């Protein structure tokens, strides 16, 4: 039998678990970089919404992925914290953040990592390298919010006010960052208007602004030209918040940098190879510039 059509490249299987992830560009980023590195990398979306499943399906899904030979999984909303009890080990970052966005299957173990924080930090360093960051307001204290809070304090933010409708969640993130960065580095936001009036910058870590959750995450009158405004949402890349902020003259940062650089870190964990970050940035830019991103 002829083997002329045989693809001898090493193969690798990975995936993403979350809700409403049909628009995610993460699969395409991983598969393209894998091809560039000489891999047959197949990256599958495991969309809980499409499957009619909830977070309670996580144990079954992790077991199935492990048995089917997945190298690992990315984990997104609403599973970043729920997945932790199902893992054997946590990296230092994942333990400090209390959230996991990358699970690697290695030697029969499930090892949890978090590349959200490093992804946000790298995007911030590139996009807003010289902004004042003495006082910053963060909206949202979920899994991604925890990672971003740690990243912001690691970037030199003097005082971080964390606002979330669930004050217990905000308090938990404050406690986590305080244990790592010291007393006074963060507070639960009690008066959003007052905190915004004194802030140098604003970071939105809520889902408000996504196609599924349109609108602004705070009253628009709280925005002013002297603020810088950052998003972690990248679908759409220009949210209503960024559009309004730009119209006022604010410096802004979209969620594209975090999306790319968290994928850079996850690719490294899944494959053991060093990704070409510049190439992944260019690929991401080409996809978001397209009228309709391709979906699997």
Image (cartoon, grey):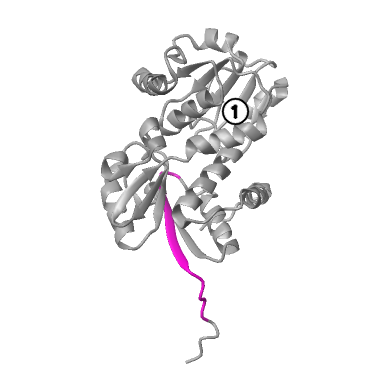
Q: Is residue 85 visible?
A: yes
Residue at (61%, 29%) from the top-left corner? 240
- Quarter of the image for residue 197 reads top right
Q: Residue at x 47, y 15 (%)?
A: 185
Q: Is residue 140 above or below residue 24?
A: above
Q: Is residue 15 left or right of residue 61?
A: right
Q: Position of residue 73 (x, y in %)?
A: 40, 51
Towards the viewer: 21 or 197: 197
Q: Nearer the viewer, residue 16 or 116?
A: 116
Write down the region rendered in magenta: 6-20
Instruction: Give above or below for 61 relative to 252.
Output: below
Residue 123 quadrant: top right
Disc tally is 1
Q: Is residue 46 visible?
A: no
Pointer 1 local density, CA inside 10 Å: few below 14, some 14–19, many at least 20: many
Residue lying furthest bottom: 1
Q: What secondary structure is found at the residue carrying circle 1?
A: strand
Relative horizontal placement of residue 120, taking residue 96 as reference (left or right) = right
Q: Please say if 203 is above or below 83.
A: above
Label 1 sits on residue:
230
Residue 51 in picture, x, y percent from top left: 36, 52
Residue 182 percent coordinates (x, y): 43, 17
Identity of the residue drawn at 56% across and 66% down: 38
Residue 167 shown in magenta: no
Frontmost residue, 243 versus 157: 157
- Position in image of residue 46 (x %, y %): 40, 52
């Amino acid at each position: 039998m002829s083997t002329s059509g045989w693809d001898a490249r090493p193969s690798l299987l990975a995936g993403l678990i979350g809700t409403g992830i049909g628009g995610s560009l993460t699969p395409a980023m991983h598969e393209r970089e894998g091809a560039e590195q000489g891999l047959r990398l197949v990256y599958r979306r495991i969309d809980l919404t499409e499957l009619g499943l909830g977070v309670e399906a996580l144990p079954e899904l992790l077991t199935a992925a492990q048995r089917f030979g997945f190298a690992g999984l990315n984990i997104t909303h609403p599973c970043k914290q729920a997945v932790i009890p199902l893992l054997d080990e946590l990296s230092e970052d994942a333990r400090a953040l209390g959230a996991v966005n990358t699970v690697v299957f290695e030697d029969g173990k499930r090892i949890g990592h978090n590349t959200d924080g490093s992804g946000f930090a790298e995007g911030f360093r590139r996009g807003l390298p010289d902004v004042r960051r003495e006082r910053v307001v963060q909206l949202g204290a979920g899994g991604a919010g925890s990672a971003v809070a740690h990243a912001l304090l690691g970037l030199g933010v003097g005082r971080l006010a964390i606002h979330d409708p669930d004050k217990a969640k905000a308090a938990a993130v404050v406690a986590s960052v305080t244990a790592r960065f010291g007393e006074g580095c963060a507070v639960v936001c009690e008066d959003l208007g007052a905190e915004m009036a004194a802030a140098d910058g604003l970071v939105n870590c809520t889902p408000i602004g996504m196609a599924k959750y349109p609108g602004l995450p705070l009253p628009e009158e709280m925005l002013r030209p002297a603020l810088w405004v950052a998003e972690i949402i990248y679908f759409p890349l220009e949210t209503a918040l960024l559009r309004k902020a730009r119209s006022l003259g604010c410096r802004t940062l979209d969620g594209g940098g975090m999306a790319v650089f968290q994928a850079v870190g996850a690719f490294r964990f899944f494959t053991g190879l060093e990704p070409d970050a510049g190439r992944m940035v260019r690929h991401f830019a080409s996809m978001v510039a397209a009228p309709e991103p391709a979906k699997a």
